Amino acid sequence: MKDIPAFERIWRLVAEVPRGRVATYGQIARMAGLVNGARTVGWALRALPDRHRVKGRPVPWHRVINAQGAISLRGREGGGEASRQAAGLRREGVVLLTGGRVDLRRYRWGGRRRPS
DNA sequence: CGTATGACGAGCC
DNA sequence: AGGCTCGCCATAC
């Protein structure tokens, strides 16, 4: 996939995550062609412009969570970023379990959904 | 060009 | 279940 920089590939993929669904860092990384680049995905989202859009297209960063189904934002209250992410998800109908975690079996975007 | 950094992840204990 | 360690990778300096 091209000579397109990793960050842009990542942003494009995130932009495709449908409303009401979520994806994990590792998932996006693999889709972007990075075998173990979960951290790189976090780095890319961290580098998003304030408007959170690329080429005029909105990048729903709040739909990206970690493999535990939890909001990662390294910690802290994070200037409210963490709570904004939770709010954004709830607004889309995603049910947040205790600890603000999401049931990946239910909301994970794309492919392999674990057969129950 | 080497070193440090992180919105992660999988293993272990 | 919860916490620590170590590995991975594109970037920034």
Image (tube, coloured by chain):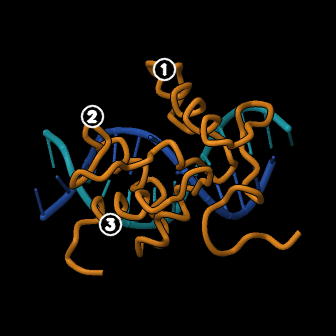
Chain colours: A orange, B blue, C cyan
Of residues A52 and A91, the one nearer the viewer is A91
Q: Position of residue A33 (x, y in %)?
A: 41, 75
Report the side of A92 relative to A105 (left or right): left
Labels 2 and 3 touching (C-beta < 8 A):
no
> What's the mark number on residue A80?
1
> How would you rate the neighbour count of disc 2 (Cα within 10 Å): few for under 14, some for 14-19, many for 20 or more?
few
Q: CA distance from mark 1 to mark 3?
A: 27 Å
| Residue receiving disc 3 | A9
Vertical relation: A32 (above or below) A16: below
| Residue receiving disc 2 | A50
**Which subunit holds the residue at mark 2?**
A
Q: Quadrant of residue A106?
A: bottom right
At horizontal 47% and vertical 27% (from top left) the residue drawn is A81
Labels 1 and 3 touching (C-beta < 8 A):
no
Q: Going from the N terminus, do you reach mark 2 or mark 1 first?
A: 2
**Which subunit holds the residue at mark 1?**
A
**Label 2 SS:** loop
Report the side of A86 relative to A17 (left or right): right
Q: Are marks 1 and 3 on the same chain?
A: yes
Q: Going from the N terminus, do you reach mark 1 or mark 3 first?
A: 3
Q: Residue furthest right?
A: A116
Q: Position of residue A116 (x, y in %)?
A: 89, 68
Q: CA distance from mark 2 to mark 1?
A: 14 Å
At horizontal 53% and vertical 22% (from top left) the residue drawn is A76
Q: Quadrant of the N terminus of chain A?
A: bottom left
Looking at the picture, which amino acid does disc 3 mark? Arg
Q: Position of residue A79 (x, y in %)?
A: 44, 18
Q: Are marks 2 and 1 on the same chain?
A: yes
At horizontal 70% and vertical 33% (from top left) the residue drawn is A100
